[in-house]
Amino acid sequence: MQRERRARAQGVRDINFSNDGRRFLSSSYDKVVKLWDTETGQVITSLGEGKMFFCAKFHPDDSKQNVVMGGCQDKKVYQWDSNTGDLVQARAPLPALPAGARPPAGCTAPDGGSAAV
């Protein structure tokens, strides 16, 4: 079944679904990351308001799907707990990559200790 959502003031930059497909994240030019209920289409919570997020991702581990990360224009990776909406941490930029190299979006180390969005 195809559904259309029109609850963003400006264009969407990124969409990411939780592993079970029941929720999804969107980041857009309206400077907020939104967590949605896939079935109802309702916004569950808004995160990182006032900052331009280029992407937003759920933690890939099924047991950590409440962990949400966003890659921001200020070159930091923000991490929230989607159950509470609390900002957990904002990590400093990753070390510079060689010219032309780009990290894949939404990568986490196997131990969950580092992330690149």
Image: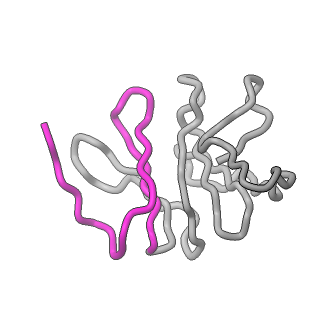
Q: Quadrant of residue 74?
A: bottom right
> As rendered, which of 82 and 101 lies closer to the eye?
101
Question: Is residue 18 found inside the magenta-colored segment of the image?
Answer: yes
Measured as percent of width and height from the top left, residue 3 is found at: 16, 48
Indicate whether 30 appears above or below 61.
below
Q: Residue 96: give x, y in percent of width and height.
A: 84, 55
34 displayed left or right of 97 = left
The quadrant in which residue 20 appears is top left
At horizontal 61% and vertical 48% (from top left) the residue drawn is 69
Q: Does the segment drawn in magenta span residue 82?
A: no
Colour scheme in the image? Answer: one colour
Q: Residue furthest right?
A: 95
Q: Residue at x 46, y 60 (%)?
A: 27
78 on left or right of 28: right
Q: Which residues are magenta?
A: 1-29
The x, y position of residue 66, in whole percent, is 55, 38
The extreme left residue here reads 1
